[in-house]
Image (spheres, grey):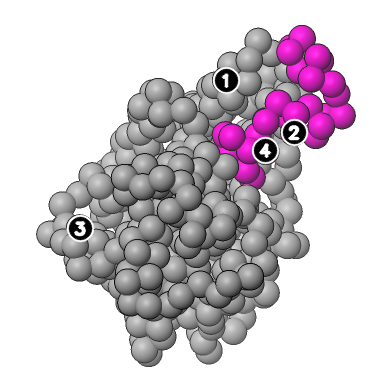
């Protein structure tokens, strides 16, 4: 096999292809992206891309490795901080500085990690885990030595997930605001949002899944939700959904008209579960801090227990573009509702004076990322997740561990 040349022209064209692929990958996901899509953005034929990357998997791996390299740059900048609080602040500042550079054209966009597990490429997996471990080291210091390994991993996942989630809401702000936003986000990430004298006491809520619901329908919803979270819309094929339930394709179509109908039902169920939990939390007497802590804990606990799997918002990028505006609008309405509750909490004194919009987005991101928490904090359970993961969101990464 002939060795590919490595001339400057070759590397320039290869870099251009990667940049175009990042855009397609972020919009369609790994399963939805094709080399033809990438070629079309550059007005090339697919064989011209194949000359540089023999498969879309190889191209996607290059995109993810480039993104991991960039995140390692953020971590390197953060490592110069003298304390955990300062390192968290520098980590976030580096990210927002990079996003400003992307907008001004002085930096190339990078892939988001929505589909990194669906690729399942060993070099990417190794680099991704190494990046996570470097980020975890940012939280290690004498002031955090009382944390257990579970607490350290859960808080690391919280920090990284909030970073990953920024892409979901940053476009609502002008680049000239980024320094202020970074400052505010660093303050709530490290210090939390609960008022100094507020007490952590989330209440237990009834299951958001209606008793007596169609058992077969629930099984299809759960299987489809899990597969979409893992492999995106395209990867969650009728064959894979059926295989996960050990049923035939005929059985699938007996219960579902189309895959699209089932996917929309999964999203609608996610929206209804979130709204139902928020409504139930609002009915309990107490402060708005109690309301938010109860709702967030319940949603995360339901996910960990497997009773109410929620579709990750990142799954929207892989569904047909005609469905995306409606789905994004539904998630936005939930975020606005959370922002309103946060404003109420500031007014009743149970929450600190924070930016309600930013906290609403980060709260949504924390709940959203709970779907992958078990991959990083392997001993976490539905009984321990609220104390190890949700409580540090409200009281801050640097708050004392839950005992």
Query: Circle 3 sits in a helix, a strand or a loop, which is it?
Result: helix
Query: Circle 1 sits in a helix, a strand or a loop, which is it?
Result: helix
Looking at the image, tell me whether mark 3 or mark 4 is earlier in sequence order: 3
Give the number of the disc on residue 182.
none
Residue located at (50% from left, 55% from top): 50
Q: Nearer the viewer, residue 55 or 227?
A: 55
Residue located at (81% from left, 32% from top): 243
Looking at the image, tell me whether mark 4 or mark 1 is earlier in sequence order: 4
Rounded to the nearest whole Å, what is the CA distance between mark 1 and mark 3? 35 Å
Q: Is residue 186 visible?
A: no
Q: Nearer the viewer, residue 185 or 160?
A: 160
Q: Nearer the viewer, residue 130 or 349?
A: 130
The residue where tag 2 is placed is 240
Q: Are marks 2 and 3 in contact (CB under 8 Å)?
A: no
The residue where tag 3 is placed is 103
Q: Are marks 1 and 2 in contact (CB under 8 Å)?
A: no
The residue where tag 4 is placed is 227
Residue 128 is situated, as x and y percent measured from the top left of the image, at: 57, 69
The furthest residue to the front: 2
Rounded to the nearest whole Å, what is the CA distance between mark 4 and mark 1? 14 Å
Q: Is residue 98 visible?
A: yes
Predominant SS of the magenta segment: helix
- Range of magenta residues: 226-255
Residue located at (67% from left, 74% from top): 149
Query: Circle 2 sits in a helix, a strand or a loop, which is it?
Result: helix
Location of the C terminus by quadrant is bottom right
Vertical arrangement, residue 315 with respect to residue 280, above or below: below
Left or right of 49? Residue 333 is left
Looking at the image, tell me whether mark 1 or mark 2 is earlier in sequence order: 2
């Amino acid at each position: 096999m002939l060795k590919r040349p490595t001339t400057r022209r070759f590397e320039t064209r290869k870099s251009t292809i990667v940049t175009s692929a990042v855009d397609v990958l972020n919009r369609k996901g790994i399963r939805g992206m094709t080399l033809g899509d990438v070629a079309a953005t550059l007005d090339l034929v697919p064989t011209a891309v194949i000359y540089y990357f023999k498969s879309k998997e190889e191209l996607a791996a290059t995109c993810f490795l480039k993104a991991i390299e960039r995140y390692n740059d953020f971590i390197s900048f953060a490592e110069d901080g003298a304390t955990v609080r300062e390192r968290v602040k520098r980590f976030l500042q580096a990210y927002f500085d990079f996003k400003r550079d992307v907008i001004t054209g002085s930096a190339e966009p990078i892939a988001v990690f929505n589909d990194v597990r669906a690729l399942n490429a060993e070099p990417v997996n190794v680099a991704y885990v190494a990046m996570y471990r470097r980020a975890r080291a940012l939280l290690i210091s004498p002031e955090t030595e009382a944390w257990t390994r579970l607490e350290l991993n859960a808080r690391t996942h919280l920090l990284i997930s909030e970073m990953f989630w920024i892409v979901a809401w940053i476009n609502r702000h002008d680049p000239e605001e980024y320094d202020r936003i970074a400052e505010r986000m660093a303050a709530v990430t490290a210090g939390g949002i609960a008022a100094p004298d507020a007490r952590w006491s989330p209440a237990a809520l009834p299951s958001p899944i209606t008793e007596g619901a169609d058992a077969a329908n629930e099984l299809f919803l759960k299987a489809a939700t899990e597969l979409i979270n893992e492999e995106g819309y395209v990867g969650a094929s009728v064959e894979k959904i059926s295989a996960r339930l050990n049923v035939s394709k005929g059985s699938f179509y007996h219960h579902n008209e189309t895959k699209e109908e089932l996917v929309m039902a999964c999203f609608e169920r996610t929206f209804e579960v979130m709204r139902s939990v928020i409504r139930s939390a609002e009915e309990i007497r107490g402060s708005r801090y109690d309301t938010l802590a109860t709702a967030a804990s319940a949603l995360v606990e339901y996910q960990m227990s497997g009773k109410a799997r929620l579709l990750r918002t990142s799954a929207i990028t892989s569904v047909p573009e005609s469905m995306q505006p409606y789905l994004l609008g539904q998630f936005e309405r939930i975020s606005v509702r959370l922002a309103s509750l946060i404003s109420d909490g500031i007014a009743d004194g149970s929450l600190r004076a924070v930016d309600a919009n930013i906290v609403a987005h980060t709260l949504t991101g924390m709940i959203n990322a709970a779907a992958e928490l078990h991959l990083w904090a392997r001993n976490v359970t539905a009984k321990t997740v609220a104390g190890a993961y949700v409580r540090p969101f409200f009281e801050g990464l640097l708050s004392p561990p839950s005992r």
